[in-house]
């Protein structure tokens, strides 16, 4: 049975059987419902010096966002809890705000160190700057002369 569109985010998607969560299995769907595919939308720009990432995290506070660099992967995670409000009279008809967590990882290379990553959070956008680093070059082969 189809429900009126006021109870779902997209009546057409429900009717056509479209799965908007395909490819986002690690996202907490309860937290964002059918908006999960648009979570942590990221723009990546390459400059002469490195890379710049802009990650949308609306509704989060700086304290709720964590960055981790391990084995060449930069992981951005965000966890949110609802503030406990006073019990209000009446019955809840629709509740879209939940608590939960999400994360996304980016391969940045084994040679990027924590001190190389610059992060800034303002107006719901996490801005990251990463330098371009290449693997250290192995010295060319040189013949070793034997004395005597």
Image: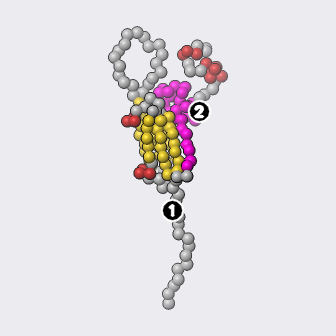
Name which residue lies at 55% across and 31% down: 38
Residue 101, visible in the rendered structure = no
Q: Is residue 17 above or below residue 71?
A: above
Q: In the rendering, at what x and y percent does residue 79 appear? A: 42, 33
Q: Is residue 148 above or below residue 15?
A: below
Q: Give the label on residue 22, or none.
A: 2
Query: Which residue occupies the foreground of this view, 29 or 106?
Result: 106
Residue farthest along the right direction in this orientation: 16
Callout 2 crowding tier (Cα within 10 Å): few <14, some 14–19, many ≥20: few
Res. 63 image quadrant: top left
Name which residue lies at 56% across and 19% down: 8
Cα–Cα span, label 1 and label 2: 39 Å
Name which residue lies at 65% across and 22% down: 16
Residue farthest along the top direction in this orientation: 90
Name which residue lies at 59% across and 32% down: 22
Q: In the rendering, at what x and y percent does residue 9 appear? A: 56, 21
Q: Give the label on residue 45, or none.
A: none
Residue 96, visible in the rendered structure = yes
Query: Which residue occupies the foreground of this view, 67 or 17?
Result: 67
In the image, residue 58 lies in the stretch drawn in magenta: no
Give SS at disc 2: loop
Residue farthest along the front direction in this orientation: 48
Give SS at disc 1: loop
In the image, the segment drawn in magenta is 21-47
- Report the residue marked by disc 1: 136
């Amino acid at each position: 049975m189809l429900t009126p569109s006021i109870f779902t985010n997209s009546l057409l998607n429900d009717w056509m059987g479209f799965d908007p969560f395909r490819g986002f299995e690690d996202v907490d769907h309860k937290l964002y419902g059918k908006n999960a595919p648009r979570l942590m939308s990221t723009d990546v720009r390459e400059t002469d010096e490195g890379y710049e990432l802009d990650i949308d995290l609306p509704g989060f506070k700086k304290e709720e966002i964590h960055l981790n660099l391990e084995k060449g992967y930069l992981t951005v995670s965000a966890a949110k809890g609802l503030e406990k409000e006073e019990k209000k009279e009446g019955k809840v008809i629709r509740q879209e705000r939940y608590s939960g967590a999400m994360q996304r990882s980016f391969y940045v290379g084994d040679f990027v160190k924590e001190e190389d990553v610059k992060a800034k959070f303002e107006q719901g956008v996490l801005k990251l700057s990463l330098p371009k680093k290449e693997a250290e070059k192995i010295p060319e082969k040189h013949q070793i002369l034997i004395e005597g």
